[in-house]
C-alpha cells in the first residue's frame, strides 16, 4: 500500500477510530482535527508503515464485526415522530454498542424545555451565603461556588456591614472593564457619592468609603503605604474583596495577587471570590498561615443555573450534544445519536473529495 492509498483509507475512517490508532503514536492527538490527525499518523509511521497498516486493518475489521444499531427515527412511523416525548421515567433502558446501559436520548423539545425568564419570587439567601457572612464577622473567607450562584450578594452585604461600621471597603477585579461594570453596579446600590474607582485611566471619588480598582492598583497602593505614603484611607480599611481570585494561579499575574494578600493590612478582613479555584482549601490554609486571623472556606458545588450542551451544525440543524438534558461529566460515551450523525455528516462533507 503506497502513501496515497494509505492516506485515502485513513480519511475514510471515523475520527474515533483515528484517535484509537493515534494512541501511543501521537501525543495530544485528541486536540487534532481529522485532516491534521491523518497527516500526523503518516508522519509518525514513516519508519514503521507496516505496523500502522496492520493496526488500521485490525480496527477496521473490529468495527465491521460490531453490530450496527438501527436508527430509531427511521423505524418509527411518521405520525409517531410528532407525538409528545415519553416521560423519562417510563422509557425502557437500552444498551449501546459499547455495552453502556442508559435511557433513550432526550428529544430536542425536552432539551429546550424550561428555558426562559422565571417568574419573580421573593429573594431568600442560600445557606452558604448566610454562612459566608457569619464567618466573615470572625475570619477571612474564601468563597468557591459555581458561576451564577450569588457571590455578588455576599460582597454587597459584607460591604454594607463594613460601611455601617465606618470602615473603608476595597473591591478588586483583574480587568478594568469589570471594574467599570462594578463601579456602575455598586453606585446604583449604595449611591454615587459612596463609590469611587481607581484604575490606570480613571480616578473618581478616591476618598469614598467603597473603592473599586484593579488588583495591580491595590498592590501599588500597599507598596506606597509600606514606604510611608498613604494615597487612600488604608488606616480605616475594614474589608478587601478580591473577585476572580483564581488569578492567583496565573503564570504572569499571579504574583500580584500573592503580594496583595501578603501586604494587606491585618485589621482588614479578606473576602476571596471565585467560581474556578481548583484547590480552594489550599488557599484558605495558606492565608491562615500568613495572616493573624484564620481563614474559612465556603464551598458550594450545586449550580443554581444548570448547564446544557448542544451542537449547531453549519446547516443550521440544532441537536442536544448528549443523551441527557444536563452535561454528563466524565461520560463521553453519552453523546446524542443525532449529534453523532451530524458529526459524521460533517466529516463526509469536509473529507478529501471536498478539500482537494
Image (tube, helix red, strand yellow):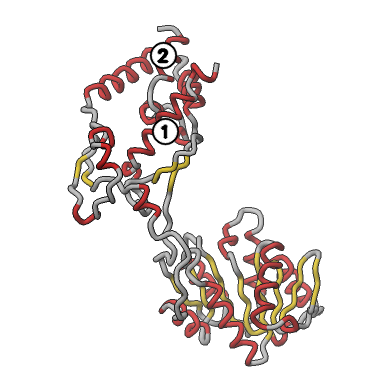
Q: Is residue 321 above or below residue 264?
A: above
Residue drawn at x 63%, y 85% is 267
Q: Mark 1 — residue?
A: 343
Residue drawn at x 32%, y 50% is 324
For label 1, the SS is: helix
Image position, residue 344 (x, y; %): 40, 29
Query: 88 or 97: nearer the eye?
Result: 88
Residue drawn at x 50%, y 19% is 43
For label 2, the SS is: helix
Image position, residue 122 (x, y; %): 45, 81
Q: Which label was assigned to residue 49? A: 2
The answer to which of marks 1 and 2 sits earlier in the sequence is 2
Image position, residue 166 (x, y; %): 67, 91
Query: 101 or 92: nearer the eye?
Result: 92
Image position, residue 27 (x, y; %): 46, 33
Compared across the picture, whether 168 is left or right of 343 comes to right
Compared across the picture, whether 335 is left or right of 256 comes to left
Label 2, residues with CA under 10 Å away: few <14, some 14-19, many ≥20: some
Q: Quadrant of residue 100?
A: top left
Residue drawn at x 43%, y 10% is 5
Label 1, residues with CA under 10 Å away: few <14, some 14-19, many ≥20: some
Q: Is residue 51 above or below residue 97?
A: above
Query: 192 or 226: nearer the eye?
Result: 192
Amino acid at each position: 500500500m503506497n502513501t496515497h492509498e494509505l492516506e485515502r483509507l485513513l480519511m475514510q475512517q471515523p475520527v474515533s477510530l483515528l484517535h484509537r490508532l493515534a494512541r501511543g503514536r501521537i501525543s495530544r492527538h485528541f486536540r487534532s482535527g481529522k485532516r491534521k490527525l491523518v497527516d500526523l499518523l503518516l508522519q509518525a509511521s514513516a519508519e514503521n508503515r507496516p505496523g500502522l497498516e496492520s493496526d488500521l486493518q485490525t480496527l477496521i475489521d473490529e468495527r465491521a464485526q460490531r453490530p450496527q444499531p438501527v436508527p430509531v427515527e427511521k423505524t418509527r412511523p411518521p405520525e409517531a415522530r410528532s407525538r409528545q416525548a415519553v416521560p423519562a421515567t417510563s422509557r425502557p433502558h437500552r444498551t449501546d454498542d459499547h455495552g453502556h446501559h442508559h435511557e433513550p436520548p432526550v428529544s430536542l423539545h425536552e432539551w429546550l424545555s424550561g428555558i426562559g425568564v422565571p417568574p419573580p419570587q421573593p429573594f431568600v439567601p442560600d445557606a452558604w451565603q448566610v454562612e459566608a457572612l457569619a464567618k466573615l464577622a470572625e475570619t477571612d473567607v474564601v468563597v468557591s461556588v459555581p458561576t451564577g450562584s450569588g457571590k455578588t450578594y455576599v460582597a454587597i452585604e459584607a460591604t454594607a456591614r463594613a460601611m455601617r461600621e465606618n470602615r473603608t471597603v476595597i473591591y478588586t477585579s483583574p480587568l478594568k472593564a469589570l471594574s467599570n461594570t462594578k463601579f456602575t453596579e455598586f453606585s446604583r446600590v449604595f449611591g454615587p457619592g459612596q463609590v469611587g474607582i481607581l484604575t490606570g485611566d480613571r480616578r473618581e471619588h478616591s476618598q469614598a468609603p467603597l473603592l473599586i480598582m484593579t488588583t495591580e492598583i491595590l498592590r501599588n497602593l500597599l507598596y506606597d503605604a509600606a514606604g510611608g505614603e498613604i494615597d487612600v484611607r488604608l488606616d480605616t480599611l475594614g474589608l478587601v474583596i478580591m473577585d476572580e481570585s483564581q488569578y492567583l494561579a496565573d503564570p504572569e499575574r499571579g504574583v500580584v495577587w500573592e503580594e496583595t494578600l501578603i501586604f494587606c493590612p491585618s485589621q482588614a478582613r479578606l473576602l476571596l471570590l471565585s467560581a474556578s479555584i481548583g484547590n480552594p482549601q489550599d488557599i484558605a490554609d495558606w492565608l491562615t498561615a500568613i495572616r493573624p486571623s484564620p481563614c474559612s472556606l465556603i464551598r458550594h458545588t450545586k449550580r443554581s443555573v444548570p448547564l446544557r450542551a448542544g451542537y449547531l451544525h453549519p446547516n443550521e440543524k440544532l441537536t442536544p450534544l448528549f443523551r441527557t438534558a444536563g452535561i454528563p461529566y466524565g461520560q463521553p460515551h453519552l453523546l446524542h445519536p443525532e449529534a453523532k450523525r451530524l458529526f459524521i455528516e460533517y466529516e463526509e462533507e469536509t473529507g478529501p473529495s471536498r478539500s482537494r
